[in-house]
Image (cartoon, helix red, strand yellow):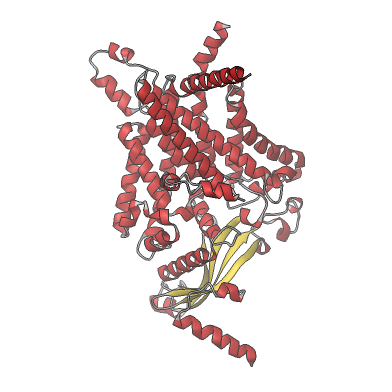
């Protein structure tokens, strides 16, 4: 192709490849743009198209709306509470630090994490765990459990129950941006941080389970393990009493 | 009547065929692809380098995104060599090698090879952790893929510098063709894909459930996220008309650009508008690499515009 003129055969071949590629591109956009019609959904099943698109990371609709002012368009973080960290003592003694661990919170991403690209990646990760009408609940639960388990083990936490939530930082209402009341105008005021999803991570010796706080339907998504079966029965007995 | 219809169809096919050949196979100059290579390379290097601090935390043994879990959640995630490396040392080595490849691609060393390797590096990163990907990675993938097809290392590169050094006959470079069909194919694909992205952005903005872009409040929602802004522009909170106008401008640009950038007479105006548009979004949206990349893709429309416009004017 590094020349000024092509033979007709070469030109025809390239034309065919271009048509196939452009068709695949169109299929990728039409099949992924939500809401989707049955016809457009079927286009995605044309043999060979999906693997080609997925290989080159073209299997998406490019529906980057940037924001629509919805709850999913703000920054999300994963937060785990009740995490122990060794507190620094005045003497710097290791023994005194171990005997007075500080109970704190793990936040992912940490506020102000730099550079911005890192922060955006973790925001995206937390957003992936948020329920929305198109995502698979079991995928979200698996991801949340896996990430939570890793965070707890990376910080050497002991087996136990750890409250976990996905938190979003709501935006200041434009009319309140100049308000003298910091609760209204400060983007980092406590009321700006809203819990979107809440649950408990059950950290075991070798495995971790996630117990959603809300409904029985969400609990049904949790894979039953020996440690988990004990807890709901105990809660039901406590409720009956 | 039948003959007229047949004649029309024949004329139509001939016009489409001629137009297609003119659009895809008329040789084009290569300078704009070289500049685009540098811009794309810099964005890729930045994104790749910013993954270093989180490499072990994310991908190593006991990481947040273990290999088996990611592959089970996303089947296409298995298309990544990162799954072969789960030790900290292995990850650092393979990631460092990927960074080296991107740097060599950016500076234009063995561009034909490093462009393909760069595509593999970027795709491997995307496939390893699809749940970390934002808007910039999909655009980066197709930009590098199309640059692989074209002679993006022909000028402004180490390859061109080496070629000049080893060439004994200085006239040889004048004899080598400066306009190439591969440059045309690469450029056209970049143009079409860029227009597609803009158009889909515009359509999605207009069809949002809250109609925020219609109400003109979307720009405020973008700039009011303190963890996502480059520069704090919330001092504009009282400038309702400015915020409304900016919101409407974003949508207008997204809808009009894919259509009106094609007529040559309008192109310089739209390219100038596009630069201002993406620069403004970069400041408030927190996706500066994406905006920079979209700005860089405007080079696909720059082509040899200056020469052809002047020649067209002289011809008239």
Please provide percent x and percent y for residue B262: 57, 25
Q: Nearer the viewer, residue B105 or A209?
A: A209
Instruction: Look at 29% across and 55% down and name the residue there.
Output: B90
| Above or below, B59 relative to B265 | below
Which image quarter is the N terminus of chain A in?
top left
Q: Nearer the viewer, residue B171 or A216?
A: A216
Please provide percent x and percent y for residue B63: 40, 63
Residue lying farthest to the front in this orientation = B2
Instruction: Look at 58% across and 45% down and name the residue there.
Output: A64
Which image quarter is the C terminus of chain A in?
bottom right
Q: Is residue A241 left or right of residue A21?
A: right
Q: Is residue A118 visible?
A: yes
Please provide percent x and percent y for residue B221: 67, 49
Instruction: Look at 62% across and 74% down and name the residue there.
Output: A214
Please provide percent x and percent y for residue A201: 50, 74
Q: Is residue B51 visible?
A: no
């Amino acid at each position: 192709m590094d020349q000024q003129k092509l033979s007709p055969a070469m030109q025809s071949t390239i034309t065919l490849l271009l048509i196939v590629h452009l068709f695949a591109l169109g299929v990728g956009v039409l099949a992924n743009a939500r809401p989707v019609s049955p016809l457009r959904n079927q286009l995605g099943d044309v043999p060979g198209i999906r693997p080609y698109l997925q290989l080159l990371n073209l299997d998406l609709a490019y529906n980057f709306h940037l924001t629509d002012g919805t709850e999913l368009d703000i920054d999300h973080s994963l937060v785990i509470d009740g995490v122990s960290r060794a507190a620094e003592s005045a003497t710097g003694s290791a023994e005194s630090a171990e005997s007075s661990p500080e109970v704190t919170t793990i936040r992912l991403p940490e506020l102000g994490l730099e550079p911005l690209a890192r922060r955006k990646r973790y925001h995206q990760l937390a957003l992936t765990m948020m329920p929305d009408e198109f995502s698979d609940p079991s995928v979200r639960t698996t991801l949340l459990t896996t990430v939570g388990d890793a965070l707890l083990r990376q910080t050497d936490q002991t087996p136990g129950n750890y409250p976990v939530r996905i938190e979003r930082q709501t935006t200041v209402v434009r009319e309140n941006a100049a308000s003298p009341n910091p609760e209204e105008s400060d983007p980092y005021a406590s009321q700006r941080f809203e819990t979107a999803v809440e649950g408990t991570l059950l950290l075991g010796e070798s495995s971790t389970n996630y117990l959603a706080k809300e409904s029985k339907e969400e609990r049904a998504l949790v894979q039953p393990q020996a440690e988990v079966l004990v807890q709901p029965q105990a809660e039901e007995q406590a409720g009956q009493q | 009547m039948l003959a007229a219809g047949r004649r029309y169809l024949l004329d139509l096919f001939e016009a489409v065929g001629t137009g297609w050949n003119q659009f895809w196979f008329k040789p084009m100059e290569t300078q704009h692809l070289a500049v685009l290579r540098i811009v794309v390379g810099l964005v890729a290097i930045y994104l790749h380098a910013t993954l270093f601090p989180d490499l072990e935390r994310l991908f190593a043994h006991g990481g947040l995104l273990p290999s088996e879990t990611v592959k089970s959640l996303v089947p296409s995630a298995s298309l990544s060599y990162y799954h072969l490396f789960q030790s900290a040392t292995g990850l650092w080595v393979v990631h460092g090698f990927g960074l080296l490849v991107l740097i060599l691609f950016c500076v234009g060393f063995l561009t034909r090879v490093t462009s393909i390797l760069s595509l593999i590096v970027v795709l491997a990163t995307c496939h390893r952790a699809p749940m970390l990907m934002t808007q910039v990675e999909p655009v980066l993938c197709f930009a590098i893929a199309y640059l692989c097809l074209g002679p993006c290392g022909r000028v402004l590169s180490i390859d061109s510098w080496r070629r000049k050094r080893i060439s004994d006959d200085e006239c040889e470079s004048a004899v080598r063709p400066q306009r190439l069909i591969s440059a045309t194919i690469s450029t056209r694909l970049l143009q079409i894909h860029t227009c597609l992205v803009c158009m889909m952005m515009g359509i999605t903005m207009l069809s949002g459930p809250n109609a925020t872009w219609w109400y003109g409040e979307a720009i405020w929602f973008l700039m009011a996220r303190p963890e996502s802004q480059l520069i704090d522009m919330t001092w504009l909170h009282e400038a309702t008309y400015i915020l409304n106008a900016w919101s409407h401008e974003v949508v207008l640009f997204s809808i009009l650009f894919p259509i009106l950038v094609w007529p040559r007479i309008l192109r310089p105006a739209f390219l100038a508008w596009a630069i201002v548009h993406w620069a403004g979004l970069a400041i408030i949206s927190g996706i500066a690499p994406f905006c920079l990349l979209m700005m860089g893709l405007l080079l696909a429309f720059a082509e040899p515009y200056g020469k052809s416009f002047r020649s067209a004017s002289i011809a008239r």
